[in-house]
Amino acid sequence: PRLHPDDQGEVLVRVDRATPAGEPLLSALVTAADHAMHPLYRHVAFSLDRPVPLSDAELRAEWAMDVLRLHHAWRYR
């Protein structure tokens, strides 16, 4: 069963609530069906008081960097 978007946002925020401010959000690894940034990524970052770029292009670039940082950090754990 699919979660309602409000519930999806709540789950993603809870997952990242303990993520330290200098680290990328784990929810960056949750993607849309086309493997693009999840539509709620902006909401999650905003809800956690993270700086959120106004432009969609800047947000996608920041998200892509977070994904790369997470892959690099977890590769050898």
Image: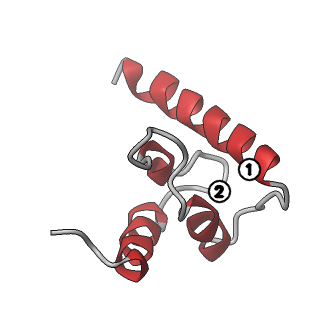
Relative height, residue 77 to residue 20 (above, below): above
Coordinates of residue 60 in the picture (x, y in percent):
69, 44
Farthest top residue in view: 76
Asked if disc 2 and disc 1 are in contact, CB closer than 8 Å, the reply is no
Residue type, mark 2 in image: Ala
- Look at 82% across and 57% down and name the residue there: 53
- Quarter residue 34 falls in: top left
Along the line of sight, the residue nearer the viewer: 35 or 53: 35
- Look at 84% across and 61% down and name the residue there: 54
Q: Residues within 10 Å of mark 1 (few under 14, many from 20)?
A: some
What element does badge 1 sit on? helix
Farthest right residue in view: 54
Q: CA distance from mark 2 to mark 1?
A: 17 Å
Relative height, residue 77 to residue 61 (above, below): above
Which callout, 2 or 1, points at the residue further toward the start of the chain? 2
What element does badge 2 sit on? loop
- Quarter residue 24 falls in: top right
In the drawing, does residue 11 fall left or right of residue 42?
Answer: left
> Label 2 belongs to which residue?
21
- Look at 23% across and 69% down and name the residue there: 2
> Label 1 belongs to which residue?
59
- Look at 55% across and 47% down and name the residue there: 37
Coordinates of residue 41 in the picture (x, y in percent):
57, 59
**Position of the N terminus by quadrant:** bottom left
Residue type, mark 1 in image: Leu
Relative height, residue 5 to residue 52 (above, below): below
In the drawing, does residue 7 fall left or right of residue 9?
Answer: left
